Amino acid sequence: MKLTRLWQPRNPAFWLMVALNLLSTVLAWIARSFELAPVAALMVAAFAIGNALLGVYLMWLLMRDEPVRPARDA
C-alpha cells in the first residue's frame, strides 16, 4: 500500500474521509472543552470515535485501490 494513494480529490470517498476526520476532531474538542452531562459526553465521544473509525476505514479503502484516472478523449 502506498500512502500517496490517499490523495484522490476526484474520488468522493476522499472528501467523505476528510469530512469525517474533521468532524471527529471537532467532536473530540467539544467533549474536552465543555462540561457536558455524562450521557451527552458519552454520546459525543461515541460519535467522535465512530467517525474516526469510519474515516480510517475509508483511508484503508483509498490506499488499497488504484486512484481514479480521468478518461482521455481521442
Image: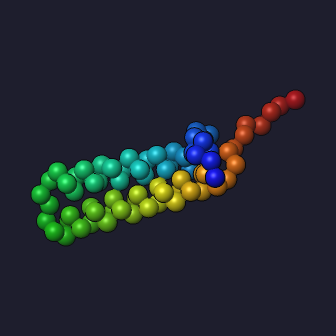
Q: Residue furthest bottom?
A: 39
Q: In this figure, which colouring scheme has been used for the structure?
A: rainbow
Asked if residue 12 shows in the view, the reply is: no
Q: Using the image as rendered, state which of residue 71 and residue 58 is in the foreground.
A: 58
Asked if residue 6 shows in the view, the reply is: yes
Give coordinates of residue 16: x percent, y percent.
Answer: 50, 49
Snapshot quadrant of residue 60: bottom right
Give coordinates of residue 8: x percent, y percent.
Answer: 60, 41
Give coordinates of residue 3: x percent, y percent.
Answer: 58, 46
Tell whether 6 sits left or right of 35: right
Q: Using the image as rendered, state which of residue 5 and residue 54 is in the foreground.
A: 5
Q: Residue furthest top?
A: 74
Question: How many badges with numbers are in the image?
Answer: 0
Tell whether 15 sits left or right of 65: left
Residue in the image at 20% along x and 65% along y: 40
Q: Using the image as rendered, state which of residue 43 and residue 66 is in the foreground.
A: 66
Residue in the image at 49% along x and 50% along y: 17
Residue in the image at 87% along x and 29% along y: 74
Q: Considering only vertical position in the picture, is 45 above or below 23? A: below
Tell whether 27 sits left or right of 63: left
Give coordinates of residue 21: x percent, y percent.
Answer: 41, 50
Snapshot quadrant of residue 49: bottom left
Snapshot quadrant of residue 61: bottom right
Residue in the image at 47% along x and 55% along y: 55
